[in-house]
Image: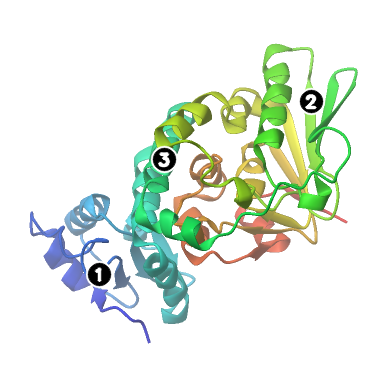
Amino acid sequence: MLSVDVLTLSSLYDLARQPYACDAFSPLSGAPCAVVDARAQPTPSQRERDLVAAWITRQACPVIAIAGPDADEPLLRAFDAIARDEADAQWLLAGVLRAPLAAMTLVQVLRATAAMPAAQALLVESLAYSTLQAGPEFQRWLRDHSPRAPQHTDDGDAVLIERDGAHLQLRLNRPQRRNAISVEMRDRLVEALQLVVADASIEAVTIGGNGACFSIGGDLDEFGSSPDPATAHAVRSQRLPAALLVQCAERVHFHVHSACIGAGVEIPAFGHRVSASRNAFFQLPELRFGLIPGAGGCVSLPRRIGRQRTTYLALSMKKINAATALAWGLVDKLTD
């Protein structure tokens, strides 16, 4: 049983006809998400489709449709995410209720950047991420999180770089930290990718990770360590691996294994090709911190798996396995 009122398509059409029907659903109201049962409904007219699509775009919250697995009604493309049934919708709703401001910001960013060039879309993502860093949901997580003292028990550079002729191999090299993307690792990745962008004689780049997994994502012990959100945005504007991958992605192949969490899936999704071991799994947990994907995932994932599946992953915070990632197009090949 869903914990919110579920709209029918007929009631949704009625709302869409009202020019000021945008205030009922938002993080500031008692309904931070709109859920619509789109099963077994009359076929809408084109005018009704257009009205609903425009209404969804204006909403300051996720708009989720419940539809059967074989539904192909064109109207469904306008929704932020598709749930298979009520239980599936409840998973998404739980994510929204955990961080309604972040959930709102996520869908607004994904809607706004869908047709943008990747470089500009990354700026929108960063600005939104910075806004949330100053918000109450992230600040609450920071108060509850006790960072550990940095532990650098691994030898060598955070990213190992090896060149063989026209091929460059990069390996994340903090296995004791499960290759968490620290400032140290981010900066080393940026330096390596700057080389790739500048040197056209590097024809192919392979990026992998040492140790038990590819990467568990951003180093949580460094979250909130920037002086302020505006400065954090300024840093991302100059030191974001994703911005460089956009410039050289056609030469880059990622191979990932085991945990690929947060930035550990957002960054590989920029690659021209992504292979994964059969034990790989993928997850976007950022709503747990009151944030959205901030390592480029609002740009890379929709371009691989579509806006609705990206929203589904982010709101549900569910793990998907390698087989599902392959079926969705998040990875291109599975290896033993």
Give percent across and percent down for residue 194.
Answer: 67, 19
Locate residue 23: give its quadrant.
bottom left
Of the numbered discs in the image, which one, if any, rests on residue 233? none
**Left or right for 5, reference 256:** left
- Residue linked to disc 2: 204
**Left or right for 105, reference 50:** right
Q: Are dots 3 and 2 in contact, CB under 8 Å?
A: no
Locate residue 82: give its quadrant.
bottom left
Residue placed most toward the observer, 101 or 183: 183
Mark 2 residue element: strand
Give percent across and percent down for residue 308.
Answer: 45, 56
Distance in Å between CA atoms under marks 3 and 2: 34 Å
Mark 1 residue element: loop
Residue 287 appears in the picture as rendered: no
Give percent across and percent down for residue 130.
Answer: 41, 40
Tell me which amino acid carries mark 2.
Ala
Disc 1 or disc 3, which is closer to the eye?
Answer: 3
**Left or right for 295, reference 125:** right
Residue at the far right in the pictured view? 164
- Residue linked to disc 3: 130
According to the image, what is the colour scheme of the structure? rainbow
Residue drawn at x 50%, y 63% as measured from the top left: 144
Disc 3 or disc 2, which is closer to the eye?
Answer: 3
Residue drawn at x 22%, y 71% as measured from the top left: 30
Residue 303 appears in the picture as rendered: yes
